[in-house]
Amino acid sequence: MRWNLRLKAAERGIWKSTEMRRLLAEHGLEISAGKMSALWTTTPTSIRLDDLDVFCAVLDCTPADLLLHEPQQVKARRDELKRAADGSSAKRAGTPVAPRLGRNRSLPPA
């Protein structure tokens, strides 16, 4: 997913995160300057649905306008995992399995 906040804000004439923060506060969402800066400059790993609803109200858009689906990213991640799995199974095929004996401990007293 790609976070499209800055483009949607620019389409509404909002060019600064401080202005966006003020508009969010007018709609009942108080965000710290640090969190607003992070939302403005990077893609969040999570966002509360209530907060997303306020963003959409301020920007007069839908969640689909803010969160853009990137299927090519999903495919690339899937291909990378598949290559890694194929590589590790090829390594395992030629290597004999040896048991692990845990820590190097001394033998108990006789």
Image (cartoon, rainbow, N blue to C red):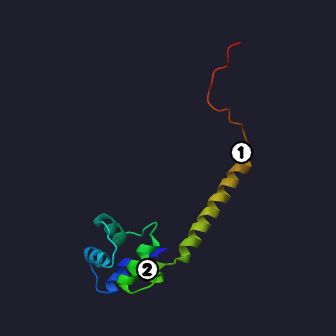
* Picture quadrant of residue 33: bottom left
* Picture quadrant of residue 74: bottom right
Q: How many marks?
A: 2
- Residue identified by numbered label 2: 66
Q: In the current view of this chain or complex, which residue is farthest to the top?
A: 110
- Work out whether 9 lies above or below 88: below
Where does the image place residue 73, in percent across and percent down from the top left? 53, 72
Where does the image place residue 50, in percent across and percent down from the top left? 44, 74
Label 2 amino acid?
Leu
In percent of the image, x 62 and y 59: which residue is there? 84
In percent of the image, x 56 and y 77: which residue is there? 71
Where does the image place residue 31, in percent across and percent down from the top left? 32, 69
Label 1 amino acid?
Thr
Give the left or right position of residue 68, taking residue 105 as reference.
left
Q: Is residue 59 visible?
A: yes
Query: Quarter holding the C terminus?
Result: top right
Tell me the number on the disc at residue 95: 1
